[in-house]
Image (cartoon, helix red, strand yellow):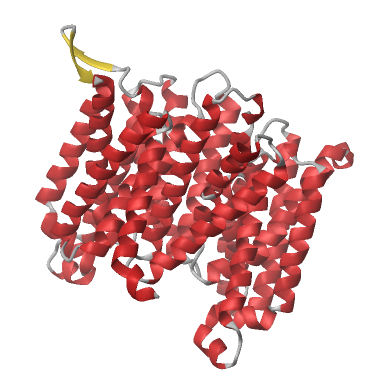
Amino acid sequence: MSHILEIWGIATITGISCSLIGTFLVLRRLSMMVDAITHTVFLGIVLAFLVTKDLNSPWLIIGATAMGVGTVYAVEWMQQRRYIRPDAAIGIVFPFLFALAIVLVTLFGKHIHLDVDTAILGDLAFATFQRFTVDAYDLGPMLLWIAMLVCLINAVCIALFKKELILTTFDPVCAKVYQAMPMAVSYGLMTLTSLTTVSSFQTVGAILVTGCMIGPPATAFMLARSVKAMLFISMVVSTIATTIGVTLAFLWDVSIGGMIATVIGCIYGLVWIYKYGRNNG
Amino acid sequence: MELLQQYTFQIVALGTVMLGLVCGVIGTFAVLRQESLLGDGVAHSTLPGVVAGFLLTGVKDTTVLLLGAICTACLSEWIMHKTSQKGVRFDAALATILAAFFGFGTVLLTRVQSMENAGQAGLNTFIFGQAVTMMQSDIWVMAICGTCIVGGVIILWKELSLTVFDPIEAQLMGIPVSKVRFFYRAALVVTIVIGIRTVGVILISSLLIGPAMIGRQWTHSLRTLVIIAAISGSAVAFTGTFVSALWGNLPTGPIIIIVMTGMILLSLVLANGKRLVRRCVG
């Protein structure tokens, strides 16, 4: 029983930190950038592993986060070229970096356990095996503590820079006039995004991070009328989805992350039908 | 050069070249409609279809899996467009639906894996792409679909180009815009579904966008753009296949993407140089 509770805890906290960040990403039309980052952090992990030769090294997390921010740089560089639109820039940068990662794994990763499938799909069922112990006293799963730390970092950053974030999101020019440094805020947000992605990587897997980060805020976008409300609603949606998802996954013995993403998609669809479906005929 | 005479290589190269050509043609329209990432979303959405097709029939038959893939891909594409018309932005809708469908796919996949059925092995490669396993029957499927799509684009050329740039004008001129759009969407979905088997879900979006991006650096006319995209798409696909075969065990899809990115960077630099020269001379 406590196994399920622990997994539920990890998933819920990951979901909350994802929706905190995701709200601003949806408002800034950066939804697909998340999809790109979730793929390219894999290259960061592979590169860091090839240098350190250690799968538990903290450099893996640093490398992955750096690669996420690097992706944003690369996409922005691409966008500034002639005749390249933002969506096309994303669509060309991240497959390239991901392809590079796959080639590197094929070339050098024969004898290591660095599985593309696991990284993409994730496996929450094994999340509780690694314990966090102090003096042989079990304080719960390691991933729970990591998830809580990341959630705390996200919450503190957003609370501190709420004004700047909102201003740069809705009116970058005005933000510049007020010296709110839109570029710095933007890169700060993207750093948080990659950090959250990397930490959720093991929990729910790359593709489903996209679901957890964009799904609840996209749902909240339809209902909320202020940023505060949107943050609140997306956290609620994410918690509900996680609870239903984890329960169903254990009931039917299927992928937990996959189930959560499916439930998020269903809630999104239902809210859309409730809001816009009726007067559509 | 004896590689060129090998039967397996010929089959794989033929397949990827055809795919590159079709992707170049249909991808140009996707890029111009600012739906470049739609390919990524639709490709991910094929997973539940593939697995459901396997679950229902119990055999790993390419036709069944492809049909399943087409069904879920169309469904997700429809939901993405429907919900982004009102209320949600296109990119947010795309990301949510992509994750939901892919998530549902993994749910089904874990269901399959818990069953005692040896046939399930290799469903993953269907998703992540494996060009080497291409067979003559796959080539036929590709050839037929590709001919239909390219032929359709040629026949509907006027309608398609007008709908891409100015749908309202097209409507006024009496062009059945929704029908033309339906053709474009269907062609896109079919291209993606036949493409994932070769280069995989994650990399097919790049094959759709890349050739158009290369072409866009060199021309301003839609006709030339589509032709350049088709040629560069197939050239890149051939080079990638050749390089990966030369080194033996390198995966074909990722190599194609890396070659393509090199080509894009090259065209960015060269096209820029061309402009500079023209400015100096003229």
Left or right: residue B106 versus residue B120 is: left
Q: Give how far across and how far down residue A17 sits, in percent.
A: 23, 42
Residue at 74%, 61% in the rendered image = B146
Q: Is residue B22 visible?
A: yes
Q: Is residue B262 visible?
A: no
User: Compared to B107, does A279 lie above or below?
Assistant: below
Q: Residue furthest bottom?
A: B173
Q: Give how far across and how far down residue A113 sits, in percent.
A: 49, 21
Q: How many marks?
A: 0
The C terminus of chain B sits in image quarter: bottom right
Residue at 32%, 52% in the rendered image = A267
Q: Give how far across and how far down residue B163 sits, in percent.
A: 57, 81
Q: Quadrant of residue A66?
A: top left
Residue at 79%, 57% in the rendered image = B143
Seen from the viewer's position, the closer of residues B35 and A269 is: A269
Q: Quadrant of residue B54?
A: top right
Q: Give how far across and how far down residue A146 sits, in percent.
A: 24, 29
Residue at 70%, 51% in the rendered image = B237
User: Compared to A131, does B218 lie above or below?
Assistant: below
User: Compared to B68, does B278 lie above or below?
Assistant: below
Seen from the viewer's position, the closer of residues B280 and A105 is: A105
Seen from the viewer's position, the closer of residues A250 and A237 is: A250
The N terminus of chain B sits in image quarter: top right
Q: Quadrant of residue B74?
A: bottom right
